[in-house]
Image: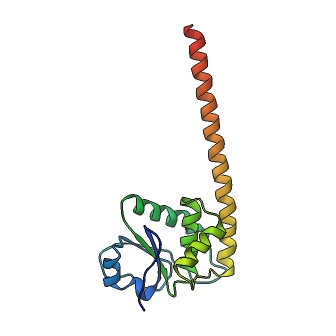
Amino acid sequence: MLQLCKVTEGLLISNARSACSDELIQQEEVTLCINVSKQQPFPSTRVATFRVPVFDDPHEDLSRYFDRCTDAIHSEKARGGRTVVYCKNGRSRSATVCVAYLMKHQGLSLTEAFEMVKSARSVVEPNPGFWAQLELYEQELKIRRTQQTNKCLQFFQFSIQRIFSQRRHTS
């Protein structure tokens, strides 16, 4: 059965056969196709496309594409579009990218993100190498968020100091 599985309003996951169904792409109003494979085709329907050229091999470095993919999904959603992420079987590579997106842009933990993707498409199972990359990405995202919070706090403290400094000089 051909099917695009809804992870969120703007994100779908699938296998290559379903993702190349022009009828499904149009029916689901897909505007961006992220093909996480070296060999699978794109649909013939005119939509934006992005290829992530990796094999489903635990030694492949899929993590180097995480930010590019997750930001593309996020941007497409912000424009009101929908993205389908797919690989040959819709199990490992595409699931890994969807989990990375949920961790980065929805703030979910690895476990929460995986469960959300798994509930949308029950066959998902990132290979052990991709899972290890997701674990590292989760830690990296925590560090980034902490650094971002610290920068915001520093800016806030600096702004408060400037306000009080200006008040003292005008009094």
Q: Residue at 64%, 52% (x, y): give it.
A: 144
Taking depth in this image into account, of 64 and 82 the one nearest to the observer is: 82
How many badges with numbers are in the image? Answer: 0
How far across and how far down the image is residue 60, in percent?
62, 78
Question: Residue 93: horizontal and vertical position, in percent?
Answer: 56, 79
Left or right side of 53 for 83 = left
Q: Residue at x 53, y 81 (%)?
A: 121
For the C terminus, which image quadrant?
top right
**Visible residue check, residue 37:** yes
Does 154 appear above or below 130?
above
Image vertical order of residue 118 relative to residue 108, above or below: below
- Residue 98 drawn above or below residue 151: below
Q: Residue at x 56, y 77 (%)?
A: 119
Q: Nearer the viewer, residue 158 or 52?
A: 158
Image quarter where the N terminus lies is: bottom left
Query: Image point 57% across, 60% down: which residue?
Result: 104
Most distant residue in the top direction: 171
Q: Is residue 37 above or below residue 141?
A: below
Identify the image quadrant of residue 98. bottom right
- Residue 62 appears in the rendering: no
Q: Residue furthest bottom?
A: 1
* Place of residue 168 in the rendered image (x, y in percent of width and height, measured from the top left): 60, 11
Q: Name the foreground residue: 62 vs 45.
A: 45
The picture quadrant where one finds residue 28 is bottom left
Q: Position of residue 58 (x, y in %)?
A: 66, 81
Which residue occupies the foreground of this view, 8 or 31? 8
